[in-house]
Image: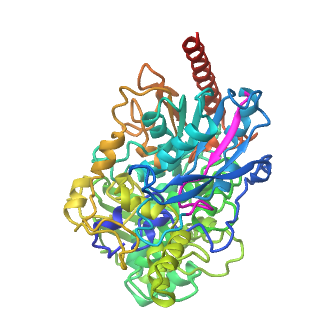
């Protein structure tokens, strides 16, 4: 929101795709003005969908924290499946705490719940997050101010306490992934009398500013580790040389140097099959070529999946199995040796790159690239190794930019084919061209933004481990910040806080400058570093997922990679554990099981089943003791 110099740009950097869109710091829009599309799992049709469930609405106050009757209300959608339960009063409840998409998305994809339910003889419940899907308020003032974590958790507590489990006779296990994983963990922390345990999958709950102070590029360090793996990454027999990270690091300053001349720009335009001739310093091509890697890593599933593309592009199209490694090994030749050689200090971004048979050598000093090579530009452009290197980058990123398999040329101004505009730009143009009616503005904003952008503003949520790249520990260039920037504090000191975007004063966002330190969130939920006093929470993280950089651990796996520690880390003696999934993507463990699953994912689900069974047994034992 606001301009690129505003601190608000940093808020809620919850996806790699969002980082490439100016004036917006959250996920891209996933909804149309009509009925939501429903992504499906590609390796098998989901055996259970919303059609199998009984869905209804529960009236909730928009503000749970004013005297009863003083708040506007809204209707929250929820869906229940009871066929596995033996007793609809006391059978366990597997409860999905909805997050930032319509409920159908989670019903279709959260196979772990559907597979555990018959084993546990449990009811299955999915509750939709406020401001998502059909759970939209009908208000005309301060209409986005009720989108917040504390209100969402209170919704889930109220629907359990008053409707689904009114006498607390059934053990409730909360499930959630990503932001939903954060919610699941916090739900257990804040309402332990209502929730017996929680599976907090891929939850960056330790990604707040204080614990992530010195981890501003750690998410991108995870990407390097993924790029360095074989295809498939879980096959220990594959030990071929892999130059993928080195080739990317070499290609980016080469693009910038070639773009300095008209002939170089023409060569880049032809090599990358651009629709329009490159007409800038190469920055647009660099942004385009670098933007996809976070999203590919999130989608590190062992089968084709539409989950990540749908979340970001609002299209039901699939990435292939293991997309990061596919980009290097199958879709391109980026893993091959293209003659690239480095010398100097890469960790300080002060090094020389030689480009094989071309005779070209580039000197890189932070964000500057120069060359003293006498080689002519024509000999460089005719070099098989230079052409092979750049063509391999093009082919690698086509896994995303040609995900529809029908793209004839590439538009570097787009993050993907038919990408929607950012929420801020969309809402600004809609407001100016269509209406001044507050009710219409509010409804349009809810449909376009959903819960995520307003929540980021209201809760001042910052996750700094995604804020920097190219600082000497990954494959990106140029660096995103000056050489003096080492910590989140350094980033904040160079920016000016501003209120969230509310041009008409209708949304209800605070008029105070945005707090870059997420102070209130850390006060309410802790930093994720001290779990004393909490119990029965599994924080699971896949080491191929960049969000694992913000996970909750006893020992952080990215302190000294590669991680060789235990699969289960005991954080407390009261069953707060970190579950490390070596070949897991973004909450892979919540997905349906597959014959393609790596052993680490299968083992993680078995561990989760064992702990959940233990928590349920303990609940019944305590309940029986209370009733004696």
Q: Residue furthest top?
A: 628
Q: Nearer the viewer, residue 98 or 109?
A: 98
Tell me where residue 475 sits by quadrant: bottom left
> Visible in this render: residue 598?
yes
> Visible in this render: residue 473?
no
| Up/down of 502 relative to 494, above or below | below
How far from the left and from the top, in percent, is residue 48? 78, 47
Q: Nearer the viewer, residue 577 or 613?
A: 613
How far from the left and from the top, in percent, is residue 200? 52, 39
Q: Main secondary structure of the magenta part?
A: loop
Tell me where residue 608 sits by quadrant: top right
Q: Quadrant of the C terminus?
A: top right
How far from the left and from the top, in percent, is residue 504? 37, 79
Q: Which segment is the magenta one?
A: 121-136
Q: Is residue 440 magenta?
A: no
| Up/down of 87 relative to 595, above or below | above
Q: Residue at the location (20% across, 65% down)?
A: 494
Q: Residue at the location (56% across, 81% down)?
A: 411
Q: Nearer the viewer, residue 570 or 181?
A: 181
Q: Quadrant of the N terminus?
A: bottom left
């Amino acid at each position: 929101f606001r301009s690129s110099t505003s601190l608000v740009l940093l808020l809620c950097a919850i996806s790699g795709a969002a980082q490439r869109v100016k004036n917006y710091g959250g996920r891209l829009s996933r909804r149309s003005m009509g009925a939501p599309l429903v992504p499906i799992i590609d390796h098998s049709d989901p055996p259970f969908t919303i059609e199998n469930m009984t869905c209804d609405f529960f009236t909730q106050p928009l503000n749970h924290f004013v005297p009863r009757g003083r708040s506007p209300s809204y209707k929250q959608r929820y869906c229940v499946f009871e066929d596995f339960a033996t007793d609809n009063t006391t059978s366990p409840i597997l409860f999905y705490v909805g997050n930032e998409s319509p409920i159908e998305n989670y019903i279709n994809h959260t196979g772990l719940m559907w597979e555990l339910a018959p084993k546990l003889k449990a009811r299955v419940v999915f509750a939709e997050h406020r401001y998502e899907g059909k759970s939209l308020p009908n208000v005309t003032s301060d209409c986005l101010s009720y989108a917040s974590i504390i209100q969402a958790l209170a919704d889930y507590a109220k629907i359990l306490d008053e409707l689904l489990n009114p006498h607390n006779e059934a053990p409730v296990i909360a499930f959630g992934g990503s932001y939903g994983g954060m919610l699941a963990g916090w739900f257990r922390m804040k309402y332990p009398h209502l929730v017996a345990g929680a599976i907090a999958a891929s939850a960056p709950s330790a990604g707040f500013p204080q614990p992530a102070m010195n981890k501003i590029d750690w998410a991108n360090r995870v990407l390097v580790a993924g790029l360095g793996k074989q295809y498939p990454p879980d096959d220990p027999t594959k030990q071929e040389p892999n130059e993928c990270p080195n080739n990317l690091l070499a290609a980016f300053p080469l693009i910038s140097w070639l773009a300095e001349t008209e002939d170089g720009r023409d060569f880049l335009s032809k090599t990358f099959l651009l629709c329009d001739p490159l007409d800038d310093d190469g920055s647009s091509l660099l942004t385009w070529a670098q933007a996809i890697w976070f999203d590919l890593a999130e989608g590190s599933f062992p089968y084709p999946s539409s989950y990540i593309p749908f979340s970001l592009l609002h299209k039901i199209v699939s990435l292939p199995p293991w997309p990061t490694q596919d980009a290097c090994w199958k879709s391109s030749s980026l893993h091959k040796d293209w003659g690239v050689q480095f010398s100097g200090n890469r960790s300080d971004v002060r090094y020389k790159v030689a480009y094989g048979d071309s005779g070209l050598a580039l000197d890189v000093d932070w964000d500057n690239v120069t060359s003293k090579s006498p080689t002519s530009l024509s000999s460089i452009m005719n070099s098989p190794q230079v052409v092979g290197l750049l063509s391999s980058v093009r082919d690698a990123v086509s896994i995303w930019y040609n995900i529809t398999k029908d793209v004839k040329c590439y538009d570097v101004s787009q993050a993907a084919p038919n990408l929607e505009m950012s929420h801020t730009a969309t809402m600004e143009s809609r407001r100016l061209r269509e209406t001044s009616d507050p009710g219409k503005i509010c409804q349009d904003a809810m449909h376009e933004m959903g819960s995520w952008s307003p929540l980021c503003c209201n809760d001042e949520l910052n996750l700094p481990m995604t804020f920097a790249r190219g600082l000497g520990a990954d494959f990106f260039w140029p660096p995103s910040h000056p050489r003096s920037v080492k910590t989140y504090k350094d980033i904040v000191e160079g920016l000016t806080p501003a209120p969230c975007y509310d041009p008409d004063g209708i949304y209800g966002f605070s008029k105070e400058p945005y707090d870059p330190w997420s102070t209130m969130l850390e006060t309410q939920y802790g930093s994720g570093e001290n779990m004393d006093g909490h119990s029965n929470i599994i924080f699971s993280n896949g080491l191929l997922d960049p969000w694992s950089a913000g996970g909750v651990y006893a020992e952080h796996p990215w302190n000294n990679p590669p991680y060789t520690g235990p699969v289960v880390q005991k954080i407390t003696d009261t069953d707060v554990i970190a579950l490390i999934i070596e070949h897991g993507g973004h909450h892979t463990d919540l997905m349906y099981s597959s014959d393609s699953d790596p052993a680490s994912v299968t083992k993680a689900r078995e561990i989760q089943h064992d702990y959940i069974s233990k928590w349920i047994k303990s609940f019944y034992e305590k309940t029986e003791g209370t009733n004696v």
